[in-house]
Image (cartoon, grey):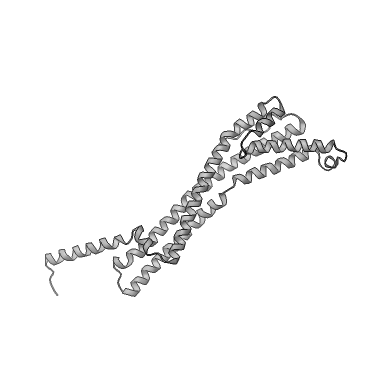
Amino acid sequence: MFLQTPATTDAAQALGGNTNAEAMKQMGFSNLMQNFDWLGWVVFVTLVAMSFLSWYFIIANGIRNATVKSRADKVIDGFWGNASTQDAIRELEAQPKSEPFSKIALDAASAVAHHQQSTSGTTGRLAESLSRSEFIDRALRQAVARESLRLEGGMTLLATVGSAAPFVGLLGTVWGIYHALIGIAATGNASMNAVAGPVGEALIMTAFGLFSAIPALFAYNFFSRSNRLTYARFDEFAHDLHDFFATGSRVEGSAPALKS
């Protein structure tokens, strides 16, 4: 056996250190982009698209929900605070098209006007088939369902990204480990130079999958609760509108106000 001198040992350590340092550079993002194959590109582009779309709907839904909540009390109180129904309707018509509570009330008022015209006509078939209360109730149900559906925009995508993105990232992880094993089998070398690049690819794909999934999952849970509270306010307002337009007076205290 040969004895290693201190100088030889130091040289070997320095050589090994330099080799490891060079190998670690292969784990960077720039090196990953240069060594992508077709499946790596598919996984990467899919994760980027998922992340972009989820953040788009997070921001869009956040702005929309905040706007609806900030205007809800003003619209509802403004409607009941008007002494004249016609003035209240004109105030509702002045609201933005994206404001849901005003659209529900306007649909109820439109249903009342349509029913009165049909009742005063020569045939009166609408009045025979549906009473005033039933006609208003049907209009309110349709309006609430329509406005509730609008609040659901993007929720399916957030749920999909939150559940599927980790598995897409896992596919990239498995593919990176597969490349590492192929490299070891081809060269018979299991050093850092042989496995650093593929392992880096696997770790980065895992991180991308989690980065896409975690915000989408938190946002989906947050918006689900926020929408449930808004749906409850839709139902409360619709019941009050039904009582008002069907009987001519509002039943005070029929449902407690819900606030998040």
| Residue 85 or residue 172, whichever sits in front | 85
Name the residue located 63 percent from the left edge and 29 percent from the top edge.
Answer: 77
Residue 102, x across and y down, in percent:
65, 36
Quadrant location of the C terminus in the rendered image: top right
Quadrant location of the N terminus in the rendered image: bottom left
Name the residue located 61 percent from the left edge and 37 percent from the top edge.
Answer: 96
Residue 137 to residue 37: above or below? above
Q: Quadrant of residue 89?
A: top right
Q: How many marks?
A: 0
Residue 168, x across and y down, in percent:
47, 60
Q: Is residue 243 visible?
A: yes
Q: Outermost residue, right direction?
A: 122
Name the residue located 31 percent from the left edge and 68 percent from the top edge.
Answer: 194
Q: Outermost residue, top direction?
A: 83
| In the displayed structure image, the side of residue 174 where residue 100 appears, left or right | right
Q: Is residue 222 visible?
A: no
| In the displayed structure image, the side of residue 48 where residue 21 appears, left or right | left
Q: Quadrant of residue 195?
A: bottom left
Residue 160, x across and y down, in percent:
54, 55
| In the displayed structure image, the side of residue 223 where residue 122 appears, left or right | right
| Residue 222 or residue 179, whichever sits in front | 179
Residue 40 to residue 142: above or below? below
Name the residue located 51 percent from the left edge and 54 percent from the top edge.
Answer: 161
